[in-house]
Image (cartoon, rainbow, N blue to C red):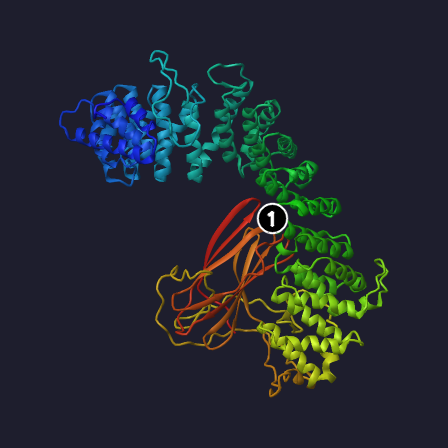
Amino acid sequence: MSPSVPLQEMIRAIRSARTQCEERGVIQRECAAIRAQFRQADNGGRSHNLAKLLYVHMLGYPAHFGQMECVRMIASPRYSEKRVGYLGAMMLLDEKQDASLLITNSIKNDLSHSNQYVQSLALCTLACMGSAEMCRDLAPEIDRLLRASNSYIKKKAALCAVHIVRKVQDLGELFAPTARSLLAEKNHGKYILNDTFTDTCLSNTVSNECNESPGVLHGAVVLITELCGQNTETLEKFRKTVPDLVQIMKGLVISGYSPEHDVAGISDPFLQVRILRLLRILGRNNEAASDAMNDLLAQVATNTDSTKTVGNAVLYETVLTVLDIKSESGLRVLAVNILGRFLLNNDRNIRYIAMTSLQKIVGTDHNAVQRHRGTIVDCLKDQDASVKRRALELSLALVSATNIRSMMKELLLFLSSCPPELKAEAASGIFNAAERYAPSQRWHIDTILHVLTTAGGDVRDETVPNLIQLITNTSELHCYTVHKLYRALLKDISQQSLVQVACWCIGEYGDLLVKGECQETEPVQVSEDDILDALETVLQSHMSSPTTRGFALTATMKLSTRITDNVDRIRSVVSIYGSCIDVELQQRAVEYNALFKKYDHMRAAVLERMPVIEKNSPGHTNGVSTGEPVKELKPVQVKQGEPQHAANQVCDLLDLLGGSEEPQQPQLAACSVVPAPPISTSTAGGDLLDLLGGLEPTPLPLLTPAPTMTVYEKDGVTLTLSCEKQSDSGLMVTLTASNSTDSNISGFTLQAAVPKSVQLHMKAPSGDSLPPSDTAKVTQMVVLNNPNKVNLKMRIRICYTIRGSTVQDTIQIDSFPTH
């Protein structure tokens, strides 16, 4: 192929290549020819060669050797070369490359050029790849062009100013007065679609005589929006422009057909969307500005055609504005009804954004959203996974005491057929809703058992102890629960959570199962052998996890005091697992065998029925009641030279706080804590310590509640920290998070970092979701080892999702509570 082939022939040759190797060969030959021509001093085809090089760059091949040629062509006096040079600069250069600094002077000269199209080229390039240094140098030129009489240049300059403000926020004050005056422009248009300036000299040809160029007003609104978002003082100044913006918007809404700006029957929808976004910023947290735009928003909401996508875009921005400002209650209901109509749209994208918006306001406008509950529940059957997830989140948020039965019926039906990736989220949401709004304890138990039967493998770890606690608190339903769990165990032993709860109940209330005197369900005759057969099936099943086998073995052992005819069979089953390969199971079996052989007289007392399990309360520490509530301590300020105790990071990000400090001599920090009364040790308790023989009973030390301090409290999320010393260099840190808002928090994670010389082990958290109104908490246990006694500092990163928005925050702790 000749080096002088036109661009079209090069494209044709590349496309006709049959293999990638052949394509690379064509491009390499052409690039070599282009390099050779670039080296020639008198080269008349520079723009031709650079155009071919840009096509090669678009295909993903290296074209960096053309950067200097772009710089030379930008400095050329010929418009044809300057145009290709600027285009090449926008594609091949960015602010990180030194070559971009070489075109600063050329851009400055072209900004003062007499030809508006040359000025436009310079403005496009600066808005596309201008660095902070270039923006500072050329900002006065842009401000001058904003005051020009040419509308075509003012439009370009306004969007270039947006890029400058984003790069250098301090320059916003320079453009604020000019931006205010641009609102008086009568020219507007639909050609600028994004905040960033991507229009590369593709505007329509404009007559210099009439000086009519679309986009000046649009560019002014975008610039003001950016200025208001950068500076609160500027925001207050531009709140005075709300009446002007309202008048502009009314003119667009009531104006007749305009062929230049009409899109599907809507007059300049792009400008309408931009004005609505600006009004949302100006009216936020300001009652006067909100009152000035209420009538306009109602007019837009009622007069805009919702049958076209363009109309839906304007309506969606209107809804967001209504919900974000201090609008009237009737207007908010109108906005929610518009979102309800979006849910009926055939376009899944529109349904998705409708549910995303409803999710954000369900806490503040709950009753208005409840009117569309049926439509939202129908979206659970949608084929799109994203729509299903949003519908699930919104449906869970709509559950209340009045609709718990109907909503739970729909959610359980969805759980039985939902995708695997949604089962865990659905099960967790159902558990939280049932705990908050259960109409009766039997209904609560039935609901949780239904979830365990349907999605037992996807529930969180805390489900089993929570259900066990619920069962112990409902003594009148023990017979009913154990019968129902026994039948579920016979049907399916693959759901590990269900099997664990069933084994626990059979072990505790197996005598009720044998009696068969349950009035709550159909009478079933169950023998002692049937119960033991079911437990042995669990012990021998390959589907049972080590934890499940532990539940089954303990249940079998407990039955030795609840049934009388099969004690020898239970003793033989327990003895078999004394040589089990699983250490935990083996240890249990050995201890249970010791109960049979050495302490058979104590077996009935040791294996008696569990008392009612209460939730952790401030008056309990480590499961022992202190008789007095734990007093929350203020943070202890550690003086110079004192060792500090801190939490650590999940994955050894130990260098977030810099290098470790030199070891210092420890000093005791005074801390006032109410001591607990001493615990008396009975003779039976002493015998329990000697199950394996050779251990003397040791008096228990005085227990003192671990002092706590609040380290984070923001937007309803509270994080407390407590420390408990394990050894001379070991420390157990407990982080406890709670949620006092009305919305559910999901994806809650904690990360921490300490100096390098500290070793850490962060245990698994108790969960990753925080239900509203402090109904449950998430705890994170951290074990620290500080052998060098260095001063500890801890940085904690908190991440969570609330109302569809992800929140991330970082705190640093320099002092810790100690005993």
Q: Is residue 466 left or right of residue 135?
A: right
- The single residue placed furthest to the top in the displayed view is 209
Q: Is residue 159 left or right of residue 749?
A: left
- The single residue placed furthest to the left in the displayed view is 41
* For residue 82, above or below residue 620: above
- Would you call the spot at circle 1 few (<14 residues within 10 Å), some (14-19), or many (20 or more)? few
Point out residue 677 in the picture as x, y percentages from the top left corner.
64, 79
Find residue 688 and report its image quarter.
bottom right
Answer whether residue 190 is visible to the viewer in this image.
Answer: yes
Element carrying mark 1: helix
Find residue 199 and report its image quarter.
top left
Answer whether residue 613 is visible to the viewer in this image.
Answer: no
Point out residue 629 in the picture as x, y percentages from the top left corner.
64, 69
Judging depth in this view, the residue of 322 and 259 nearest the camera is 259
Q: Residue at x 61, y 67 (%)?
A: 546
* For residue 21, above or below residue 417: above
Point out residue 308 in the picture as x, y percentages from the top left corner.
57, 23
Q: Residue at x 69, y 46 (%)?
A: 411
**Amino acid type, label 1:** Pro
* For residue 636, above or below residue 243: below
Q: Quadrant of the N terminus?
A: top left
| Residue labelled with disc 1 | 420
Q: Is residue 511 left or right of residue 180?
A: right
Point out residue 370 in the picture as x, y percentages from the top left corner.
69, 39
Q: Is residue 573 left or right of residue 768?
A: right
Counting labels gives: 1
